[in-house]
Amino acid sequence: MQSFAGVKNMPHPLFVGSAAEKGDKMKNPNPFAKFIITGSVTFAWELFGGHTLEFMKVMKQTTNDSYGKILKDMVANKGIMGALDGFLPWGGIQALIKGAVIGGAHAAAKRALKPVPMSDRMKEIAAGGIGGGVQGLVLSPFLLLKTRVMTDPAFRAEAGLLQTAVHSTKIGARVVANEGPATLMKGATVFSLKRVADWSTRFIFVDLVEHTLFEEDAKKKNLSFFQSAVASLGGGTLSVIVTLPLDVLVANIQKASEGGKKTELVRLLREQGLGLATKGFVARVAHVAITTMVVKTVSSRIYETYLNM
């Protein structure tokens, strides 16, 4: 009976404590496994909703249209498939690499920081910032090409998904031929710094929400999946408040109408006013909050399941 009592009191595997630092394998994660798992999970999220939210965010940041008009224009000629303009190939590549790089780089940075005399909480945050910086440098060319597709009205014309993907692929060669190879890294410095800020603040605010709402469980590193998900959503939302101006700047630097131009912040502010810094807030919050949950909570739970196989 004692053995059955022990089984009865075991928590359901879906709601066991936070996977962030459980056991030695969680404190010293396998970068390759995290690379594969986080990349796959992020790709699925971007395909089934994330890309559409980012598409709406970019259009809101680079135009004066309402969300209703943006969505209407997206689906006007292609139906629901219009929401995937820019996803193939550039958005898909970006989604796969985005998750893979932040997962792998974060895990590698966490291992490298192991001997550094700082708390586990600070190592988690520092590793997040390092992973974000690496992610920014790797992703910048793909983000630029995806943004060019999303902000070019020519791609809203009636065409199938495959035809749009073929035309999207050609835009890379066209950008290099017309503007030079260096254009692929246009905005890369700002984007990389933004990614450092993105992931540093996400980890900081997730930690803050965990210790504010679930103090006892957070101290014991015994957060449930639900608690971790709530903290990720809250931390992602708070992060947007800090980093949105940089996000808007990147979108406006890389949009199609800026092709071949030297983008100047002063000119953008003169043309659009200080309101430029807060454009796309709603779509950005939705995208970042869910992405933070996917990367920090869902992928970690899948990684923990993988370790227990």
Image (cartoon, helix red, strand yellow):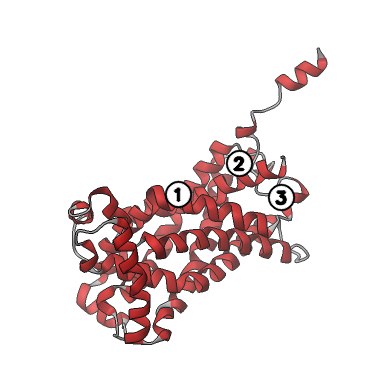
Seen at 52% across and 45% down, the residue is: 231
> Which type of secondary structure does the marked residue at label 2 adopt?
helix
Relative to 129, 184 lies left or right? left
Q: Inspect the image, locate mark 1, and give the three-letter code of the amino acid beneath it.
A: Trp
In the rendered structure, the answer to whether residue 150 lies left or right of residue 14 reads left
Q: Which residue is mark 3?
A: 26
- Residue 307: x and y, percent? 71, 44
Gap between marks 3 and 1, in whole Å? Answer: 24 Å
Residue 12 location (% of width, % of height): 64, 28
Q: Is residue 170 left or right of residue 9?
A: left
Of the pair 109 and 203, the residue shown nearer to us:
109
Asked if residue 201 is positioned above or below residue 234 in the image, the reply reads: below
Residue 190 vs residue 52, the one in the foreground: 52
Number of the front mark, 3 or 1: 1
Q: Earlier in the sequence, mark 1 or mark 2?
A: 1
Q: Quadrant of the C terminus?
A: top right
Which of the marked residues, 3 or 2, is nearer the chain's N terminus?
A: 3
Give above or below for 79 relative to 113.
above
Res 51 quadrant in image: bottom left
**Quadrant of the rendering where the N terminus is positioned:** top right
